[in-house]
Amino acid sequence: MAEQNDETFRVIDRRLFNPEGELREEAREQIEQEQKAAQKAVVPPPAEPKPARDGGKQPAAAAEAAEKPNRSPAFEMLIDLIARNAVALLGGITDPRTGKPMVDLEGAREVVDMLDALREKTRGNLATEEEQLLLDVIGSLKMSYLEMSRAAASAAAGRERGRGNL
């Protein structure tokens, strides 16, 4: 039986490490190339200084203000929307059928965690007012969550004590 050499596909070993656990030479070269490309992309070309009226010196506050992003009403509305959902889950809205507040502590915790994640992912990209709004909302919601959790735990403990007396 003659052996056929079919080259319809090819297997390429793309693992970073060899069987001895050392970085393969091809992988090392690729990493170096990627690092060089990243450095070139990150380093901005030197900016030409703009002449200023005060003798060429730009105040530090003005330089920092130029780097800070502008306020976005849409972002503030997003924070408000998410916060309202958390408030609703913490009993801020009554169930129209029962007339009792709807409480979902687990859901409220997840919404607060989403706001925390939003804060982490937008760090350094928000206007000062937006950062402060986000911090205030998260702090307020965490305090409300803590109060509601304590109240729920107390109510559950009271029910347990009531059952024990029967």
Image (spheres, helix red, strand yellow):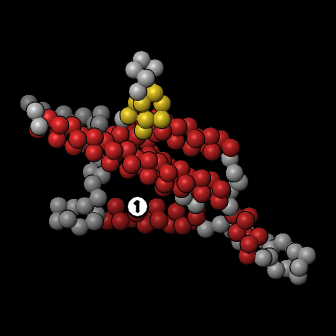
Decide: few, some or many residues near mark 1? Use Cα within 10 Å; few <14, some 14-19, many ≥20.
few
For the N terminus, give its image quadrant. Answer: top left
* Residue drawn where x is 17% and y is 61% of the image: 19
Residue that lies at the very extreme toward the top in this rendered image: 97
User: Residue at label 1?
Assistant: 30
Residue type at mark 1 is: Gln
**Percent from the top left, x then y, of residue 115?**
48, 47
Instruction: From the top left corner, tell me how far across and down residue 110 is, in percent.
Output: 39, 42
Quadrant showing the C terminus? top left
Q: Nearer the viewer, residue 159 or 107?
A: 159
Indicate the position of residue 159 as horizontal and vertical percent values.
21, 37
Dividing the picture into quadrants, the one containing residue 2 is top left
Q: Residue furthest front?
A: 165
Q: Secondary structure at mark 1?
A: helix
- Tell me residue 154's x, y (percent): 27, 45
Q: Is residue 56 left or right of residue 71?
A: right
Residue at x-position 58% and y-position 60%: 124
Residue found farthest to the left:
1
Q: Residue at point 39% right, 20% down?
A: 98
Where is residue 136, by image quadrant?
bottom right
Q: Is residue 128 above or below residue 142?
A: below
Q: Is residue 113 visible?
A: no
Q: Does residue 145 appear anywhere in the picture?
A: yes
